[in-house]
Amino acid sequence: MAFALIAHDYDDALERRLACREQHLARLRALAADGLFLGGGVLLNEQGKMIGSNVHLGFEQREALELWLKDEPYVNEKVWETVEIREMRLFSPN
């Protein structure tokens, strides 16, 4: 099942985001190696400042995604203020 994770940062989160960014990216690389990271990236404001994330994940169940999220550095280090998880259908050009 595919999920979209849309997260918005705390207003003062930029330094915390940068401090734990490599941990966050390492976790996404591990998901990619398991075929669970489907795509995503950083959300930017009009000035190009990082203000959130949009991640597409392929967990079999929402509960597995929520379990993974409990160890996410951007959650634990208070980078993401809000996290919305939505089930989605990915577009396939085939």
Image (spheres, rainbow, N blue to C red):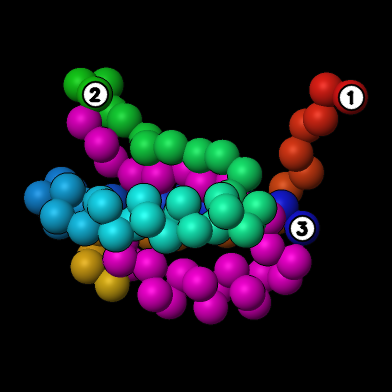
Q: Quadrant of the C terminus?
A: top right
Alpha-carbon span between mark 3 and mark 2: 32 Å
Task: Inspect the magenta stretch and tell me whether residue 50 lies in it.
Answer: yes
Quadrant of the snapshot with the N terminus: bottom right
Which structural element holds mark 3?
loop
Rate crowding at label 2 as few (under 14), some (14 to 19) or many (20 or more) other CA atoms within 10 Å.
few
At a point 40% along the width and 44% down the height, the residue shown is 53
Q: Residue at x 46, y 53 (%)?
A: 28
Kind of residue indicated by mark 3: Met
Q: Residue furthest right?
A: 94
In the image, which disc is placed on residue 48?
2
77 is higher (above) or lower (below) than 45: below
Q: What amino acid is at disc 2? A: Gly
- The stretch of residues the image draws in magenta is 49-75
Residue 44 sits above or below residue 84 on the image: above
Of badges 3 and 2, the one in the foreground is: 3
Q: Secondary structure beneath disc 1? A: loop
